[in-house]
Amino acid sequence: QVQLVESGGGFVQAGGSLRLSCTASGILFSIYHMGWYRQAPGKQRELVASISSGGITNAADIVKGRFTISRDNAKNSVYLQMNSLKPEDAAVYYCNAGRGSTSFWGKGTLVTVSS
C-alpha cells in the first residue's frame, strides 16, 4: 500500500518560515519524481516545486528565491523549505510522487499565514 504522509504545516506570521516534510512508503522512492502542490480555497491545485529522481529541481515563479525543495532518498522523504512566507502562500500543501502514468498523492498539510 502506497502512502505519502505530509507534515510540518501550521500557522506562521508573514515573513516567517516553515519546513514541510513528506515521507513515502510502499514505493521505490528514489526513482520517483516528487512534487509539492498547493490548493487555496476556491482555487485550482497548482505546482509549487518539483525534484526529479536525479535531483533536478524546478519551482514556480511565484516562489522562486523563497521556497526550496530537496529530497533524502535514504529517508524516503522530500522537503519544502518555505521562507519569507506571504499571506497568499496560505493553502493546503500536497505531496505527489510521479513516474510515467503513475501518480500518488498525500492527504495534505495546512499552511496558514497571517498578515
Image (cartoon, helix red, strand yellow):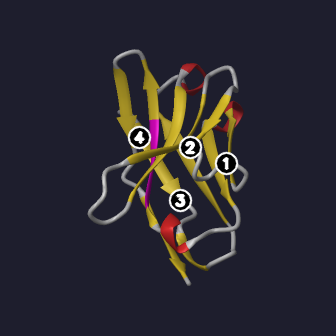
Q: Quick check: is 101 in the magenta stretch?
A: no
Considering depth in this image, is 32 or 85 the residue closer to the camera?
85
Q: CA distance from mark 1 to mark 3?
A: 22 Å
Mark on residue 64?
Answer: 1
* Image point (57%, 19%), residue name: 31
- Measured from the top left, where is residue 39 in percent x and y? 37, 56
Using residue 44 as the reference point, say whether residue 97 is left or right of it: right
**Do the residues bearing badges 3 and 2 touch, measured as CB atoms within 8 Å?**
no
**Mark 1 or mark 3, which is nearer to you?**
1
Residue bounds of the magenta highlight: 92-96
Q: Earlier in the sequence, mark 2 or mark 4?
A: 4
For the C terminus, give its image quadrant: bottom right
- Measured from the top left, where is residue 56 in percent x and y? 68, 26
- Measured from the top left, where is residue 72 in percent x and y? 70, 36
Under mark 4, the amino acid is Gln
- Eyeballing the image, is 102 above or below 4? above
Q: Which residue is mark 3?
A: 7
Q: CA distance from mark 4 to mark 3?
A: 13 Å
Q: CA distance from mark 3 to mark 2?
A: 21 Å
Q: CA distance from mark 1 to mark 2?
A: 6 Å
Helix, strand or loop at mark 2: loop
* Image point (35%, 21%), residue name: 102
Under mark 1, the amino acid is Lys
Q: CA distance from mark 1 to mark 4?
A: 28 Å
Q: Earlier in the sequence, mark 1 or mark 4?
A: 4
Residue 85 at least partly seen: yes
- Measured from the top left, where is residue 32 in percent x and y? 53, 24
Residue 26 at least partly seen: no
Q: Quick check: is 94 in the magenta stretch?
A: yes
Mark on residue 3?
Answer: 4
**Do the residues bearing badges 1 and 3 touch, measured as CB atoms within 8 Å?**
no
